[in-house]
Amino acid sequence: MKYYETWAKWADKSVAMCCVVGRIAASVLRKGSSSGKSENQNSEKLVSLCCGASDKFSLMKQRCEAVNSSTFFVCGLLSLCALAGAQQKNTERGTNGRSASAAGIVIRVQSRLVLLDVVVTDPKGEPVSGLRREDFVVYEDGSAQTIKNFESPTMHQLPAPEKAVKAATAFRPEVTASYGQSPVTLLVLDELNTHFSDVHFAVDAVRRYLQARPTTLNSPTLLAAVTDKGFRMLHDYTRDRDALLKALNTHKPDYAWKLELGGSVGEQTVERLDLSVSALEQLAGFSARIPGRKNLVWVGKGFPSLDPNALGPEEQKTLDDTMQHVTDTLLDRRVTLYAVDPTSNAPGMSELTDDTQVAFAQASGENATRSMDPFNTGLDFDKLGPVSGGRVVRGMNDVDQQIEASVELGAQYYSISYTPASDNTAAAGYRKITVKCLRPGTQVMTREGYYSGAAARQKSAVNSTYDLNNAVMAAVPFTALKLRAEPLGEGRYSVHVAAPGLTWEPSGGGEQVAHAQVLGAALAADGRILNHTLHTMTVTARAGTDVLSPSLPADFAINVAVPSGTARLRFIVRDVATGAMGSFDLAVPASH
C-alpha cells in the first residue's frame, strides 16, 4: 500500500532462557525419579532439547528487501522458560478516542480499562436478572472504583437470522459478525490427565448433556480434546447439536500413557503440564476473533501440580510466571474456566458442600482486599477457575448436570468496566479485584484480579518466544489479528494484516508506527518444521492515514525458503505491544 513504508529490525535471538526449562525438568527428574542412571540420561535429553547454537545479529534497520533469515528455536512446548512473563496489555483494555481534521488525521488516546464479566446468583443458585449499574460496587486493592460501562445479560445476544433461514444454518463460524455479543461454549475432553475409565464416563456425560439440548443450540459451541499427542479440534463452533454429537460419537478417546506410566513425578508430568498449558493457549488464540465471553468447560482432572520441594527458587519463579502468562491470555480473550472432574472417587471441594452451592459457589475464598498473586504458592489447576471468574467442581457424580450448570451460569453475565483510580502501574504486581452486589442474599462470581501492566510489558520479549512457538505448532489458527498471505515470486511472500488489530503510536510529523514479529515457517504434512524465518518489523502509516479502517491492510514482505517435502507455509504475525497474534496457512503444491 502507498500508505506504508516497512522496515525490518534484526534482534539477537539468545537461547539462554531456553536452557531454564532443562534445569527445571532436570530438577524434577533428579528429585522425583527412582532410577539414578535414567535420570541423568533424561536430564541431558531435556537440556539438549532446549539448548543450541544461535546466530548473533547486531541491531540495525534496513529495507525489508534486504532481510535474510534469522534463527528461531522451536524447542517444543516443554520450554516453559519462555513463559517467564506476560504482557499486561492482556488484562487491560485500551479505549480509543477518535477525532479527525479535514485532512483525515486520526488522533488516538489510550486509557487503561479493566473489563469484568460478572455472574450474580440468588440463594437458590439461580441467576439474578434486572440488576442495574448502581447495584454493583467494584474495588481494586481495597479502593472503590468508578464504573464506566455497564451491560446487562440481555445485551449479550446472537444476531437475529433472516426469517427464511434456519438459525443453525445462518450461523457461520468463520464470520465474526455471526457471534454478535453472544457468549460461546468450549467443551474440552481432558484425555491427557484423566484415567481411561474416567474418560469414558466423561464422554458419556458430554453426550447426555448434548442430547438434552435443543437441536439448535442457544450459543455457538465447539468440541475439542487434549490427548498425549496434543490438542485436537473435534468440531469448530456450531449451533447444530447433532453435528457435535456425530463428532463425539466418532471420536475414539486416547489412552493416557503419560499419566499411567509417569504418575505424578518425572518427565511425563512435565510433558502433561506442557500439553495442557498449550491447549489453553490454543483455545484462547483460536477464539480471539469472537468479541463475547468464552465459557471453557474442561471435563477432566486438569494439568498436574509440580512438587515445589523439587524445584529451586529460580525454577519455582519460572513456573509461577507460567501461570501469570496463562492467566493473562485467558483474561485478555475473556475466557472463563469451568472445570468438572469426572473422577468417581475425587474428594469434594470444601467450598462446594451441597447441590445448591455447586451451581454458584465461588471457590476463591474471602480474601477481599489482599493484593496477593494467587500463584505465589505454586502451580495449581484448581486456581485457574476462580481466578478467571469460573469454578472447579470435584467429587460430584452428576457430571452432565454440572456441565449444564456451568454453561448456564456462563451465559447469564453482566459486563462491567472501570478505569483504575491509581495510575501507578508499578504499585503492585497483582491487582486484587472485588465486586459486590448490593442486593441482599446474592453471590458474585468474577475474576479475582489481574497483573499490572508495567511488570508484564517488561517481560513481553521473553514471552514472544513461547507465543510464536505455540502458534507455529498449533493445531488451530490464531485469530486475534486478521491476516492473509500471498506469494510474490522467488521465495518472497506478502503478509497483509488488518491495520486496526495492531498497536499504533505517534512517530512525529503526523506519522504512526506499529511493531510486529513476522514468522514464516515451512511445514511438512505431519507438522514438522522444515524451515523458518523470523523478523521484528516496523510498519509506518503516513500522515492522514486512518489506521482504524477495517479495510486498510498493513503489509509485510518476508522471504521463506521452501524445502522439498513442504506441504504448507504458515505465516504468523504477533503485535509486539499486546502479544495479539494471527496465523495463516498457505498450501504448497505437491509438485513443488
Image (cartoon, helix red, strand yellow):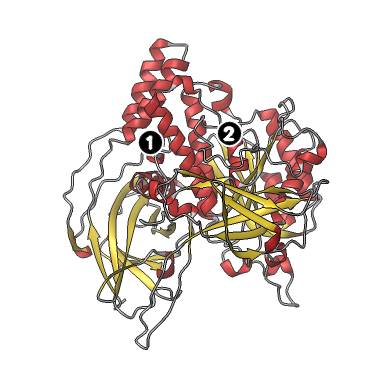
Q: Which residue corresponds to the image point at 71% horizontal and 45% vertical from the top-left?
A: 249
Residue 493 can be seen, yes or no: yes
Q: Quadrant of the N terminus?
A: bottom left
Q: As displayed, is residue 354 above or below residue 545? A: above
Say above or below: 172 vs 581: below
Tell me whether the residue at label 2 lies in contact with that at label 1, contact meaning CB atoms closer than 8 angstroms.
no
Residue type pointed to by label 1: Cys
Where is residue 546? Give x, y as percent. 39, 77
**444 or 189, which is in the foreground?**
444
- Looking at the rendered image, the quarter that the C terminus falls into is bottom left
Residue 76 picture quarter: top left
Does 3 sit left or right of 582 as displayed? Answer: left
* The label number, if any, that marks residue 546 in the structure image: none
Q: Secondary structure under badge 2?
A: loop
Judging depth in this view, the residue of 501 and 46 nearest the camera is 501
Position of 141 relative to 273 (above/below): below
Q: Position of residue 220 (x, y in %)?
A: 67, 59
Q: What is the C-alpha distance between the residues marked 2 and 1?
A: 22 Å
The quarter of the displayed image where residue 110 is located: bottom left
**x, y percent for residue 270:** 47, 29
Mark 1 secondary-structure assignment? helix
Q: Residue at x 26, y 67 (%)?
A: 6
Residue 81: which disc?
A: 1
Q: Image check: 372 left or right of 463?
A: right
Per the image, the residue denoted by label 2 is 192
Tag 2: amino acid? Leu
Mark with earlier residue (2, 1): 1
Name the side, left or right, on which 244 lies relative to 516.
right
Of 409 and 534, the residue lying toward us: 409
Q: Judge the density around disc 1: few (<14), some (14-19), many (≥20) Cα neighbours within 10 Å.
A: many
Q: Nearer the viewer, mark 2 or mark 1?
A: 1
